[in-house]
C-alpha cells in the first residue's frame, strides 16, 4: 500500500531551539515512517515579513541550520524529503491560481496574519502577508499532501487550504485530496516564564547551545517569585523549571521527588536547576554529537537539500500539469501554439524557398 503524504516545515529565520523540538520536530521524527514525508524549508514565507537583501542572504545559513537541526534530532534523509521552497517554481504558479479561489475578507479575518504584521512592526498589511495562507495552500497541495502537522497558530491556515482544495476540485475536477491537519506538540514556555520560547524574545535554549551556555541560561531562569528562601513551599504548576523537567528529564522518580520537596519547601532552586542542567545536557548531547558526525562529511547537508528539492520539483511539475489540464489552460495554449507554430513553419519554409530561388 502506498503511504499517505505529509507536509510540514519551518521558516529559515534562525537557529532552532527546544520549543521547536517540543512543538514539532519530536513529532516529525515519530511520523517519518508512517507517511511519505516532505519537509519544507519555507524561505518564501520568510519574505512576507523579512525581505531585505541581508535577510535573504541569511537564508543560506538559516536553511542549513533548519536542515541540520531536524537531521540531528532524527529526521533521516533516506526516508524523507527535505526541500527548499523557493526552488520549486511550480509553487509560484499554483499560488496565483489559488489566489482566485479565496477572498480578501476571508483572509483578512485571520487573527494570525494580523499578529504577524504587528510582530513585524508593519503599519500596513502587505499583499504578500495577506496571501500567506494561499501560499501555504500551494505548499500543501503541491505534493497533494493528505496530512499537515501544524502548530495551533497555523490550524486556521490549513482550514483555508481545505477550502481551496474543495473549491478547486468542485470547479475543475478532482485533483487534490482534502488535507487533514494534525495539531501537534506542546507549547514550551521560555526561560523567562513569561511567554512561549521564541528567538525574537530571547528566552531560548538552542539545540546547539554548548553545555556551559545551557547551564548559564538555566541558572538565570525564572522560578516561583514568591519563594525567597529554599524553605518556603513553592509552586510547581506553571513553573518553567518544572515544565522543562517534565519535558526533558526522563528520570521521573527524580522529578517527582524534586516536585514533592519543592512543594514542602525542602529543596533549593539551585539543586532543581542543577539537575535540570544535567537532564537537558544529556538530552542535547546526542543531538550535538550527531551534528559533528553530519558535518564531518562536508557538503552532505547541501546534497540532502539539493536531492530533496529535485525530487520535489518533479512532483510539483506533475501536480501543476494536472491542475492546468483540469482547468483547461493547457488546452488554450495547445490550440494557439499548434496553429501559430504551423503558420510560422509555413512562412519560414516559404522564405527559405524564396531564398533558394534567388540563388
Ligand atoms: P520568531 O521569534 O522569529 O517568531 P520563533 O522562535 O518563535 O521565531 P517560529 O519560526 O515562530 O519560531 O516557530 C515556527 C513553529 O515552531 C511554530 O509555528 C510552532 O509550531 C513551533 N514553535 C516555535 N516556538 C515554539 C514553542 N515555544 N513551543 C512549541 N512550539 C514552538
Ligand atoms: Mg514565532
Image: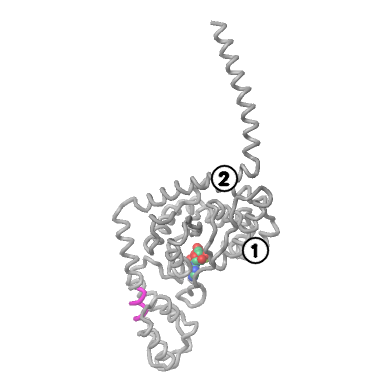
Residue 218: give x, y in percent of width and height.
Answer: 39, 77
Q: Is residue 202 left or right of residue 122?
A: left
Name above or below for residue 136 compared with residue 261: above
Say which element carries label 2.
helix
- In the rendered structure, find residue 180 and report the number of the disc placed on it: none
Q: Which residue is mark 1?
A: 110
Mark 1 neighbour density, 10 Å: few (under 14) some (14–19) many (20 or more):
some
Q: Locate residue 204: give its quadrant.
A: bottom left
Q: Locate residue 116: give its quadrant.
A: bottom right
Q: Which residue is at 61% across, 64% downward?
A: 156
For the stretch drawn in magenta, the main secondary structure is helix
The answer to if 281 sits in the magenta stretch is no
Question: Closest to the observer: 328 or 302?
Answer: 328
Name above or below for residue 243 compared with residue 197: below
The answer to if 275 sits in the magenta stretch is yes
Instruction: State how far apart marks 2 and 1 are (Cα).
Output: 27 Å
Q: Which residue is at 52% across, 56% downward?
A: 46
Question: Closest to the observer: 196 or 351?
Answer: 351
Residue 292: give x, y in percent of width and height.
Answer: 30, 60
Q: Is residue 104 left or right of residue 273?
A: right
- First-in-chain label (2 vs 1): 1
- In the rendered structure, find residue 320 and report the number of the disc placed on it: 2
Question: Closest to the observer: 323 or 115?
Answer: 323
Is residue 200 something one can see in this rendering?
no
Residue range highlighted in magenta: 274-280
Q: Which residue is at 59% across, 14% downward?
A: 351
Amino acid at each position: 500500500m502506498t503511504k499517505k503524504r505529509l507536509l510540514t516545515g519551518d521558516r529559515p529565520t534562525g537557529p532552532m531551539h527546544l520549543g521547536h523540538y517540543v512543538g514539532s520536530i519530536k513529532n516529525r521524527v515519530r511520523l517519518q515512517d508512517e507517511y511519505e514525508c516532505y519537509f519544507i524549508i519555507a524561505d518564501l514565507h520568510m519574505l512576507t515579513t523579512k525581505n531585505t537583501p541581508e535577510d535573504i542572504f541569511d537564508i543560506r545559513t538559516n536553511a542549513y541550520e533548519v536542515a541540520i537541526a531536524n537531521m540531528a534530532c532524527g529526521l533521516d534523509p533516506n526516508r524523507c524529503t527535505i526541500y527548499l521552497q523557493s526552488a520549486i517554481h511550480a509553487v509560484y504558479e499554483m499560488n496565483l491560481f489559488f489566489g482566485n479561489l479565496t477572498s480578501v475578507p476571508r483572509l483578512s479575518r485571520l487573527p494570525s496574519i494580523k499578529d504577524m504584521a504587528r510582530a513585524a512592526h508593519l503599519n500596513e498589511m502587505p499583499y504578500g502577508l495577506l496571501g500567506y495562507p494561499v501560499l501555504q495552500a500551494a505548499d500543501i497541495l503541491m505534493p497533494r499532501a493528505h496530512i499537515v502537522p501544524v502548530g495551533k497558530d497555523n490550524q486556521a491556515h490549513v482550514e483555508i487550504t481545505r477550502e481551496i482544495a474543495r473549491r478547486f476540485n468542485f470547479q475543475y475536477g478532482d485533483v487534490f485530496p482534502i488535507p487533514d491537519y494534525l495539531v501537534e506538540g506542546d507549547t514550551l514556555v521560555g526561560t523567562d516564564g513569561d511567554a512561549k520560547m521564541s528567538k525574537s524574545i530571547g528566552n531560548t535554549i538552542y539545540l546547539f547551545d554548548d553545555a556551559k551556555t545551557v547551564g548559564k541560561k538555566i541558572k538565570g531562569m525564572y522560578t516561583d517569585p514568591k519563594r525567597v528562601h529554599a524553605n518556603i513551599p513553592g509552586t510547581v504548576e506553571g513553573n518553567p523549571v518544572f515544565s522543562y523537567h517534565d519535558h526533558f528529564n526522563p528520570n521521573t522518580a527524580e522529578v517527582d521527588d524534586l516536585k514533592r520537596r519543592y512543594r514542602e519547601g525542602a529543596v533549593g532552586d539551585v539543586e532543581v536547576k542543577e539537575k535540570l542542567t544535567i537532564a537537558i545536557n544529556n538530552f542535547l548531547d546526542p543531538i550535538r554529537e550527531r551534528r559533528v558526525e553530519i558535518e564531518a562529511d562536508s557538503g552532505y547537508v547541501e546534497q540532502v537539500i539539493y536531492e530533496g528539492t529535485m525530487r520535489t520539483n518533479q512532483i510539483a511539475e506533475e501536480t501543476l500539469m494536472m491542475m492546468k489540464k483540469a482547468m483547461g489552460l493547457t488546452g488554450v495554449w495547445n490550440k494557439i501554439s499548434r496553429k501559430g507554430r504551423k503558420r510560422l513553419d509555413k512562412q519560414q519554409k516559404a522564405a527559405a524557398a524564396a531564398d533558394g530561388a534567388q540563388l
